[in-house]
Image: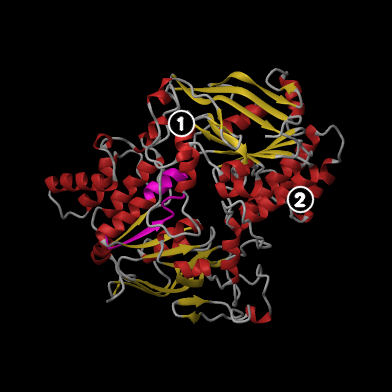
């Protein structure tokens, strides 16, 4: 079966006064129908830009994005509009991604109206269905965003994303603005919707426990590049890239009796503007040596486990 | 809890805000104790009153629309709520200082970072240190080369800005540090660096710390004692071991249950149903009762007493026996 999403050598560069910013640099992956790909990394690593470039909110610089086997990243006009019905996004901050002057109902209806595919009565009916689907009370139909709490607001955002029955949804940190008890409600909802509708997700987050819970496969990004990609369980059992290892060891564990020695990285993210060839993590990597400053190859270390590190076999 | 001399003691603190003619009950009778060199974690969700407690201790709540209705805040035996503003100003920065949540907004964007540290020393330290020298020293302590004294906040990354905020807070060797979500705005690898730094500095200067956070993982790493707060009320209070090994209040249990498990695979998470109560219209009894599986009519009657659990920590729940039995 053709994967729902195929991304090949995707690049997104931004021009800045100081040079080219390599936000997404040569990223390749596929996502099968009904699966979730988690994308993790720290702020500024390009994970959100990757999601937005895939659904064509940003024009890609180079590379190919295919939806159900057909290239979509060169489309424009009506063809793009049609493709977008199949690709939607849930944004990070439910406080700023929803129009403060529209009621919950109006926000959810908007995609249905814009698509021009439905009669007025159908729109009303579908809005009812969507509100029930994401668990918004009928009495909140005419509530404005400021009257809703973060969790309910995010439910409105989810209903809006699902209005046109998309196949692929980019979830861009959908729960990071929410408290843990509400976060769990929204994560369960996303999972249930995926099971019921066969949705394919790309789940962008910086929270390792959330990504472990929701993903089938995980990509770890560092400064625009994928440094490691493998099935979710494998990543947590057997992280191979030094950056992944540092990332996992930095998570504060709630297990007070098993506080393992943490690997504390020195330094911070280097600039993604005009980066030098070679491993971008080398400047902070405790294992870096000369070979790391040359171009790196992605290697399939074991079936399905890809690592971009020239020292992976020695470590 | 240790019974030796308490350095900070908050007794029965009540704070209210006024908003749109309604009264927001932000903090409702909170009691906390903190010994020298110890760290107390104050854990709870958005709007639980955590930051309001810290600001009350430092007396920096807004003048308009906000009132400390009652209670006492004793620092080293002195009630901070009774002293004059002049006296309080001497205590701020010198005896107590605060690390604010968001390093992006806590710094002055048009002032050199070094000068921002030196300013605190000049204002609060009675000529004990040379401000410029002390600022340079503090930069080095938090891992920023002193050459960067003359730079502005926008030239620094988020992690470095937070380290500047920490340097400001620690510049006068305070006895008490109020850390309000000091690492929430940071990435995990940077968070690990900053937590390590705070831990080192605290050990070096024997500083007591009130750490406000919503992250149980951070609490597990840093704190000695933990207070869980819900809707302005402390619902559970004990040592870290007591709270993490035997959480007893249904809210604490729910909070632990809602975190995705890093070691086990589970199909579904266990959220706490419902929402926190409206702080302008709190339930008469237990604030958590509307969301609680164990709630009975008794919970709604009136204020809930604090009971001792089997291992001796405090829990404000009248159904401790049922909760310990479990089954729900």
Segment colored magenta = A166-186
- The magenta stretch spans residue A179: yes
Q: Mark 2 or 1, which is nearer the eye? A: 1
Callout 2: chain = B
Q: Residue A144 in the image: x percent, y percent?
A: 32, 36
| Left or right: B127 as drawn, with respect to A92 | right
Residue nearest the viewer, comparing B162 with B197:
B197
- Residue position marked by numbered label 2 in the rendering: B139
Give the mark, 2 or 1, whose residue is nearer the N terminus: 2
- Residue position marked by numbered label 1 in the rendering: B319
Colour setting = secondary structure
Circle 2: element type? helix
Q: Residue B227 in the image: x percent, y percent?
A: 59, 36
Kindly identify the residue that appears in the image at 65 percent across and 47 percent down: B222
| Left or right: A9 as drawn, with respect to B193 | left
> Where is the C terminus of chain A found, in terms of image quarters?
bottom right
Mark seen at residue A258:
none
Query: Looking at the image, is A252 positioned above or below residue B80?
Result: below
> Where is the N terminus of chain A found, in terms of image quarters?
bottom left
């Amino acid at each position: 079966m053709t994967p729902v999403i195929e991304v090949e050598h995707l690049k997104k560069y931004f021009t800045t006064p100081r040079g080219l910013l390599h936000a997404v640099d040569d990223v390749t992956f596929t996502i099968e129908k009904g699966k979730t790909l988690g994308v993790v990394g720290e702020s500024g690593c390009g994970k959100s830009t990757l999601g937005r470039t895939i659904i064509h909110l940003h024009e890609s610089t180079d590379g190919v994005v295919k939806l159900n086997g057909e290239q979509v990243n060169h489309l424009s006009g009506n063809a793009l509009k049609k493709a977008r019905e199949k690709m939607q996004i849930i944004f990070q901050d439910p406080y700023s991604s929803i129009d403060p002057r529209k009621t919950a109902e109006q926000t959810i209806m908007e995609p249905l109206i814009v698509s021009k595919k439905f009669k007025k009565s159908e729109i009303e009916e579908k809005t009812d269905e969507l509100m029930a689907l994401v668990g918004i009370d009928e009495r909140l139909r005419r509530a404005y965003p400021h009257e809703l709490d973060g969790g309910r607001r995010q439910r409105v955002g989810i209903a809006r994303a699902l209005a046109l029955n998309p196949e692929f949804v980019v979830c861009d940190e959908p729960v990071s603005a929410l408290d843990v008890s509400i976060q769990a409600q929204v994560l369960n909802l996303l999972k249930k919707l995926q099971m019921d509708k066969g949705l394919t997700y790309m789940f962008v987050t910086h929270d390792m426990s959330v990504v472990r819970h929701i993903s089938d496969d995980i990509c770890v990004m560092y400064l625009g590049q994928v440094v490691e990609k493998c099935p979710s369980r494998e990543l947590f059992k057997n992280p191979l890239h030094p950056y992944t290892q540092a990332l996992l060891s930095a998570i504060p564990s709630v297990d007070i009796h098993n506080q393992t020695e943490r690997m504390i990285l020195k330094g911070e993210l280097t600039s993604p503007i005009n980066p030098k060839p070679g491993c971008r993590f080398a400047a902070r990597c405790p294992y870096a040596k000369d070979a790391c400053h040359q171009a790196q190859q992605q290697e399939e270390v074991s079936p399905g486990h890809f690592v971009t590190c020239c020292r992976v076999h020695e470590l | 809890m240790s019974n030796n001399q308490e350095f900070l003691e908050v007794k029965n603190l009540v704070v209210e805000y006024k908003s749109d003619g309604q009264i927001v009950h932000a903090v409702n009778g909170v009691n906390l104790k903190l010994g020298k060199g110890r760290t107390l974690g104050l854990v709870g969700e958005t709007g639980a009153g955590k930051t309001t407690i810290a600001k009350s201790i430092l007396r920096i709540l807004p003048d308009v629309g906000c009132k400390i209705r009652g209670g006492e805040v004793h620092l080293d035996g002195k009630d901070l709520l009774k002293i004059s503003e002049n006296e309080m100003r001497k205590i701020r920065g010198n005896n107590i200082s605060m690390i604010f949540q968001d390093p992006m907004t806590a710094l002055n964007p048009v002032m050199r970072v070094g000068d921002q540290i030196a300013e605190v020393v000049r204002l609060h330290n009675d000529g004990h240190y040379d401000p410029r020298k002390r600022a340079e020293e503090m930069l080095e302590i938090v891992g920023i080369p002193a050459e960067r004294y003359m730079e502005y906040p926008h030239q620094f990354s988020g992690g470095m800005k937070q380290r500047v905020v920490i340097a400001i807070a620690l510049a006068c060797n305070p006895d008490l540090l109020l850390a309000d979500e000091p690492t929430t705005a940071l990435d995990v690898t940077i968070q690990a660096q900053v937590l390590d730094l705070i831990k080192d500095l605290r050990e070096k200067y024997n500083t007591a710390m009130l750490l406000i956070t919503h992250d149980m993982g951070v609490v597990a790493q840093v704190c000695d004692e933990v207070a869980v707060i819900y809707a302005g009320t402390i619902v559970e209070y004990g040592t870290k071991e007591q709270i993490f090994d035997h959480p007893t209040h249904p809210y604490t249990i729910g909070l632990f249950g809602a975190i995705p498990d890093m070691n086990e695979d589970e199909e579904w998470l266990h959220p706490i149903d419902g929402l926190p109560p409206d702080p302008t219209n709190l339930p008469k009894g237990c604030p958590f009762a509307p969301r609680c599986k164990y709630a009975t009519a008794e919970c709604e009657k009136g204020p809930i007493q604090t009971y001792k659990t089997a291992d001796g920590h405090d829990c404000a729940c009248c159904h401790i026996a049922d909760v310990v039995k479990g089954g729900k």
